[in-house]
Image (cartoon, helix red, strand yellow):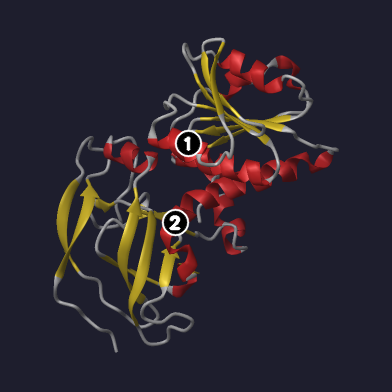
């Protein structure tokens, strides 16, 4: 039997394509119907996609609605489960996925991030309400159970899935030849850039992060905590905190060619990774002699087409 909660909840919604329309709204708390679970939101991330939706650049409300509840990065806890739900119980931590498939071959094969038809929906972005409310209803097929040990940073799972996909695909593409990258350039120190830096360091690459963020900013502090021994010095108009494997570069005049040259010294193989929300033009960072290097742009938003990874 479905459980109906008559109380209301607060949420943040926009009127799609109307700049600056973000506002608090009051909505009924969803029901716990058969085959679904009622989720209580613990944390929601805000990223460039949410900002661009509020700027009116894109966004699509659910059918029959004139507003869209935003938010697609969320950590939630199961509040109640409906009949027929297995594998989840009250109190479980969950990150819900964002994209819901259409009937294209890739979607039907479980690869909705490679959708061919574009008729998918995305929670908080395209055709479905998101997670920036106190509650939402979800089906188990789109729920990822989170171990309690990951609670402090589980809200980052959605952006991490995008970076993981990009990194995996980069190495997959380069399997066509012998490729042993030694250095990588990351353009931008937003969440995507920081997570990309961590993944590239875990793969053993020397990483050069080029960003507008000052070393004492939140982004700079997060990155410097990744290094054990860092020496700060001025180099050619760049503020450089140099360690063996991680270099933080802040442009004095946005000279990407200089950054690329610095990273390429002594390197025959490299990768350039762009945080689309915060980075500069990725093609400007690739010198003609980059040889077997690889450029990839990692961002969220409709510009990505069907190549985007959505958890």
Q: Is residue 26 visible?
A: yes
Residue 294's disc is none
Depicted 187 relative to depicted 199: above or below: above
Residue at which label 2 appears: 153
Q: Position of residue 245 (x, y in %)?
A: 66, 34
Q: Position of residue 34 (x, y in %)?
A: 36, 83
The 10 Å Cα crowd at callout 2, few under 14, some 14 to 19, many 20 or more, is few
Depicted 292 relative to depicted 100: above or below: above
Depicted 204 relative to depicted 28: above or below: above
The answer to which of 289 and 190 lies nearer the viewer is 190
Residue for point 34% across, 37% down: 52
- Rendered image quadrant of residue 21: top left
Residue at which label 1 appears: 303
The quadrant in which the N terminus is found is bottom left
The answer to which of 133 and 120 lies nearer the viewer is 133
Depicted 149 relative to depicted 61: above or below: below
Residue for point 23% across, 50% down: 13
Most extreme residue toward the right is 178
Q: Position of residue 244 (x, y in %)?
A: 67, 32
The answer to which of 288 and 129 lies nearer the viewer is 288
64 relative position to 86: left or right:
left
Q: Earlier in the sequence, mark 2 or mark 1?
A: 2
Q: Is residue 115 visible?
A: no
Q: Position of residue 193 (x, y in %)?
A: 51, 37
Alpha-carbon span between mark 2 and mark 1: 27 Å
Q: Secondary structure at mark 1?
A: helix
- Rendered image quadrant of residue 63: bottom left
Q: Secondary structure at mark 2?
A: helix
Residue for point 68% across, 16% down: 287
């Amino acid at each position: 039997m479905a459980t109906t909660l008559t109380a209301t909840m607060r949420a943040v919604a926009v009127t799609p394509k109307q700049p600056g329309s973000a506002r608090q709204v009051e909505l009924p708390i969803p029901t716990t119907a058969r085959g679904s679970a009622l989720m209580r939101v613990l944390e929601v991330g805000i990223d460039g996609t949410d900002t661009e939706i509020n700027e009116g650049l894109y966004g699509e409300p659910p059918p029959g609605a004139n507003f869209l509840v935003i938010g697609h990065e969320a950590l939630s806890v199961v509040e109640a489960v409906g009949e027929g739900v297995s594998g989840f119980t009250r109190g479980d931590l969950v990150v819900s996925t964002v994209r819901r498939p259409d009937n294209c071959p890739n979607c039907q094969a479980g690869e909705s991030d490679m959708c061919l038809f574009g008729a998918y929906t995305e929670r908080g972005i395209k055709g479905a309400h998101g997670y920036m409310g106190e509650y939402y209803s979800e089906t188990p097929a789109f729920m990822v159970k989170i171990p309690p040990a990951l609670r402090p940073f589980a809200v980052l799972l959605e952006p991490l899935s995008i970076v993981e996909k990009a990194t995996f695909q980069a190495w997959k593409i380069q399997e066509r030849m012998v490729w042993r990258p030694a250095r990588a350039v990351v353009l931008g120190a937003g969440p995507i850039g920081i997570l990309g830096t961590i993944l590239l360091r875990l793969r053993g690459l020397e990483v050069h992060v080029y960003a507008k963020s000052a070393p004492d900013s939140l982004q700079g502090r997060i990155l410097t905590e990744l290094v054990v021994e860092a020496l700060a010095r001025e180099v050619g108009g760049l503020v450089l905190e140099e360690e063996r494997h991680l270099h933080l570069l802040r442009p004095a005049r946005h000279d990407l060619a200089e950054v690329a040259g610095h990273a390429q010294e002594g390197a025959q193989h490299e990768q350039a990774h762009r945080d689309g929300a915060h980075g500069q033009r990725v093609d400007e960072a690739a010198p003609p002699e980059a040889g077997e290097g690889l450029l990839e742009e990692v961002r969220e938003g409709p510009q990505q087409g069907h190549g985007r990874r959505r958890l």
